[in-house]
Image (cartoon, rainbow, N blue to C red):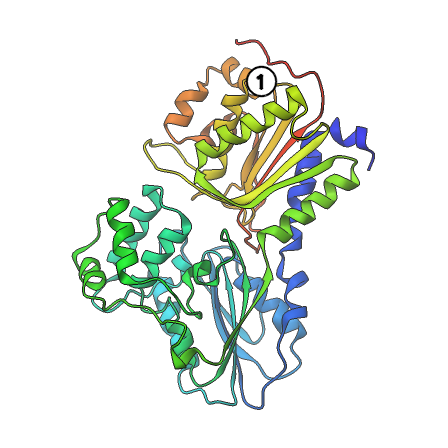
């Protein structure tokens, strides 16, 4: 690829970077090197997440011996497996299929012995897919809590802390059910900091947080909980398994793919095209629109003053932003970020951007994200679309969809969180005039 060709085709370069990030995290590329040795006894595979079915398929293809098991993935994310059952359920709000799958997972590991091996395939999305309410709670209670958490603007770590303590399978409980078998966790991280307890709310790892921590989050975020959920947190009956629990003594964890690795893969594509990449961080959190405005400020400094980087360059970042829902739009945290950034840049020339979720689903829409460029606001206004009104309504998908700028990938079969790239070409940095 020549530098000039790619800078003159910014969307093609940005899309190639996104595709490389996703490809680096696909299970067929990252699972085989991390497989454990076969045990003397049985090998049982369990798992949950948007990538779990593809992880199971990759494992099957590289596992020489006996194998059985069950994983649960999002509707539309199943792939064919011969020895491992694949079940689909709802995300981001759990459903009855997820509850039934969680119960089946517990049955899969019941009665295992010390010579047996459990391979646990966990990726982002498993919190909703493993929908087993804790004692005293119903599926309706868990659904209500999920909706409240998604709308309140809590971080993923905060959301998963609450989920763990209200669950009958998360927070190490699934690993405890495997005891005394050996458990090897193969994880694809979708969380800032790559904390195993936050990936799918940690069904097979220890948790250092407490019911008191979960209660503090609920109160700080003003989340309305069902009465049974309040009781479970207040009386401590929802406590999770801690690191010193003997049932977790034979659990080991291997991180097979992370957001940082995906960003590095994208950076390699930019570098090959002659554009200098700068990774700003793989764990950026915060309100999506606020992150958009901050990165717009950094972008403007680069484009107009050559600080702290000189163009041509591309600013890459990952993490997981949040959205406090106030409007009735179609949502999407990546498109909300991108819309806020685009408004803040006000048509700055020579700046093109992409923001998308690596699982192919931004929010609850089957849309990964969107593109934006220096003419985005001008084109929107020509169509009578008010960018500020779209942002106020949390309608990023509606805004970019009307412009034909949505990025639709279909199921990517992996999930390493949000991907953001801002290409600064070094063209004259002047804004388009207001229309």
Q: Position of residue 328 (x, y in %)?
A: 33, 32
Above or below, comparing residue 83 to residue 435 in the picture: below
Name the spot of residue 43 as percent of width and height, x first: 54, 82
In depth, the one of 357 and 181 nearer the eye is 181
Q: Residue at x 67, y 34 (%)?
A: 314
Which residue is outermost to the right?
A: 2
Q: What is the total number of numbered labels drawn onto the structure image?
A: 1
Q: Is residue 283 above or below residue 132?
A: above
Report the residue at 24% width, 48% height from top: 219
**Percent x, y for residue 258?**
58, 56
The residue identified by callout 1 is: 347
Q: Nearer the viewer, residue 336 or 330?
A: 336
Q: In the picture, which quadrant includes the N terminus?
A: top right
Query: Where's residue 299, x and y in %?
Result: 60, 27
- The image quadrant that residue 171 belongs to is bottom left
Res. 46 visible in picture: yes
Left or right: 258, with 286 as reference point: right
Of residues 405 and 327, which is closer to you in this image? 327
Residue displayed at 26% across by 59% down? 212
Element type at mark 1: loop
Residue at x 40%, y 51% (from the top left corner): 92
Q: Is residue 80 visible?
A: no
Give the left or right position of residue 141, taking residue 91 as reference.
Answer: left
Q: Up-down: is 63 above or below 165? A: below
Q: Dot 1: within a 10 Å radius of its alpha carbon, few (fewer than 14), some, or many (20 or more) residues?
A: many
């Amino acid at each position: 690829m020549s530098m000039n060709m790619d800078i003159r085709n910014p969307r093609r370069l940005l899309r190639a970077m996104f595709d490389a990030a996703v490809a680096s995290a696909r299970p067929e590329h990252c699972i085989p090197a991390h497989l454990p040795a076969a045990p003397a006894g049985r090998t049982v595979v369990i798992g949950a997440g948007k990538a779990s079915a593809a992880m199971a398929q990759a494992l099957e293809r590289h596992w020489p011996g006996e194998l059985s098991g069950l994983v649960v993935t999002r509707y539309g994310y199943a792939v064919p497996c011969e020895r491992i059952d694949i079940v689909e359920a709802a995300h981001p709000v759990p459903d009855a299929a997820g509850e039934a799958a969680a119960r089946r997972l517990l049955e899969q590991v019941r009665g295992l012995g010390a010579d047996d091996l459990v391979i646990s395939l966990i990726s982002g999305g498993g919190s909703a897919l493993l929908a087993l309410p804790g004692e005293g709670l119903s599926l309706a209670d868990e659904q209500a809590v999920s909706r409240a958490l998604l709308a309140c603007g809590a971080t993923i770590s905060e959301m998963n802390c609450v989920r763990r303590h209200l669950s009958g399978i998360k927070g190490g409980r699934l690993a405890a059910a495997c005891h005394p078998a050996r458990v090897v966790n193969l994880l694809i991280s979708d969380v800032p900091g790559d904390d195993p307890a936050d990936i799918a709310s940690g069904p097979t790892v220890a948790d250092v947080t407490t019911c008191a921590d979960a209660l503090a989050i609920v109160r700080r975020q003003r989340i309305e909980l069902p009465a049974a959920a309040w009781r479970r947190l207040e009386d401590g009956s929802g406590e999770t398994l801690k690191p010193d629990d003997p049932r977790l003594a034979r659990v080991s964890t291997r991180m097979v793919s992370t957001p940082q690795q995906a960003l590095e893969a994208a950076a390699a594509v930019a570098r090959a095209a002659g554009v200098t990449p700068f990774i700003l961080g793989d764990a950026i959190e915060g309100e999506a629109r606020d992150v958009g405005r901050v990165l717009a400020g950094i972008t403007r400094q680069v484009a107009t003053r050559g600080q702290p980087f000189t163009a041509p360059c591309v600013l890459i970042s990952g993490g997981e932003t949040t959205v406090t829902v106030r409007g009735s739009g179609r949502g999407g945290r990546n498109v909300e970020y991108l819309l806020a950034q685009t408004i803040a840049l006000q048509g700055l020339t020579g700046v093109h951007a992409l923001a998308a979720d690596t699982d192919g689903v931004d929010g609850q829409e089957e849309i990964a994200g969107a593109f934006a460029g220096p003419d985005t606001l001008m084109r929107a206004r020509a169509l009578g679309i008010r960018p500020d009104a779209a942002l106020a309504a949390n309608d990023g998908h509606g805004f970019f969809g009307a412009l034909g700028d949505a990025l639709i990938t279909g199921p990517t079969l992996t999930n390493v969180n949000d991907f953001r790239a801002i290409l600064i070409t070094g063209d004259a940095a002047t804004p388009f005039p207001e229309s």
